[in-house]
Amino acid sequence: MTIMKHIYKTFAASVTFFLIFLTVTAQNFNELYTVISYPVVPAKFCDLHKDVKESSGLIYFKEAIWTMNDSGGLPEIYKIDKTTGEIIQTVNIGNGSNVDWEDITQDENYIYVGDFGNNNGNRKDLKIYKIPKRNISNKKKITVTAEIIEFTFHDQQDFTGNSRNHDFDCESVVSAGDSLILFSKNWADNKTRMYRIPKVPGKYEADPEDTFDADGLITGADYLETSKSLILIGYKNHIPFMFLFRDFNGKSFGKDEVYRFDFVRMTGAQTEGVAWLNKDTVVFSTEQTKEFTQQAWELNLQTVFDLIKGN
């Protein structure tokens, strides 16, 4: 296989400012990676309410972050007050159920909630709930009816189940143009596959369009169409990480300029949701673990890049 050269810029979370340059070879693709390590520490954005212990996705809507719980939670999304971390609005999906909600995304007119978590690899009822924003009033608690997009992975043939040892889990979705783009969470090989399905309610078979060697588990994503910037978040060996893809075209990963941030000072945190606040800043959530409470964190990417240029 042809050797492809990628540039990964890995930012290690540390209070000591230094640069480390090293070269490693990724065995799976025979690709040569240049890794640049640089320290950065995210700031706390807000605490999350005790009823949102398993925040599994984020969007920024109506000048607030919105999130929801993982599997077993109620079929609800929550608007969070940044100052108190309290739930200030609850939107219940009246025709929905929370089998394993894993991510949330939006476009100008709709919010999309992904019920496609598949730890055991045996689900055949993957779906996305499509909620019209016009139906979300300012009432503290409301119930809405969602349209439903159903899908399966065309390349999955085996549904016997193999808990956390397969490549057909999914915890990430973004909106891009007229499509929803899904990113798999590959327990077995730590890569991620990209799938595309229409936003129109119906039943679909999703074909893989591209693969990326994430060297970890991808658990969340967000895409900023105005700058063509894709964020993927996840963790490996209990250390959270984040990928930034520049000039993402929605059809392939576009691996010419890829940055990786490793938050080593957050070891033990389980990062799940991520959203763009603006063109420079992202916010991401962590579930409750032994080391961390449920929280949201903020990272200004431009500040990080300015620090690099200054050194």
Image: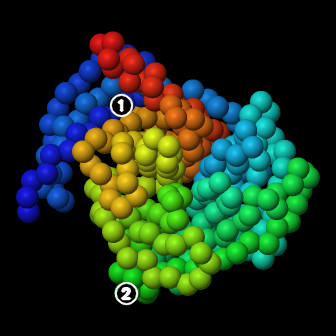
State the residue position of label 2.
157
Residue 289: x and y in percent read 59, 46
- Secondary structure under the numbered disc 2 in the rendered image: loop
Task: Name the spot of residue 62 as percent of width and height, x first.
Answer: 75, 43
Decide if residue 1 is in sight here: yes
Name the amino acid type tagged 1: Phe
Neighbours of disc 2 within 10 Å: few (<14), some (14-19), many (20+): few
Is residue 101 depicted above or below 67 in this figure? Answer: below
- Compare marks 1 and 2 and give the one earlier in the sequence: 1
In the rendered view of the protein, which quadrant contains the N terminus?
A: bottom left
Q: 56 and 162: which one is in front? A: 56
Q: Nearer the viewer, residue 92 or 164?
A: 92
**Quarter of the figure with residue 44:** top right
Q: How many marks?
A: 2
Name the residue rendered at 15%, 37% in the picture: 23
Q: Is residue 142 left or right of residue 248?
A: right
- Say above or below: 303 vs 74: above
Residue at the spot of label 1:
11
How many C-alpha atoms fall within 10 Å of the one at disc 1: few (<14), some, or many (≥20)? many
Label of residue 296 in the image: none
Residue at the image point whose x is 81% and y is 41% from the top: 86
Residue at coordinates 28% horizontally, 41% vertically from top-left? 257
> Considering only vertical position in the picture, is 7 above or below 220?
above
The residue that appears at 36% across and 61% down in the rendered structure is 251
User: Along the line of sight, which residue is nearer the eye, 254 or 1?
Assistant: 254
Q: Quadrant of residue 302?
A: top left
Q: Disc 2 residue type?
A: Gln
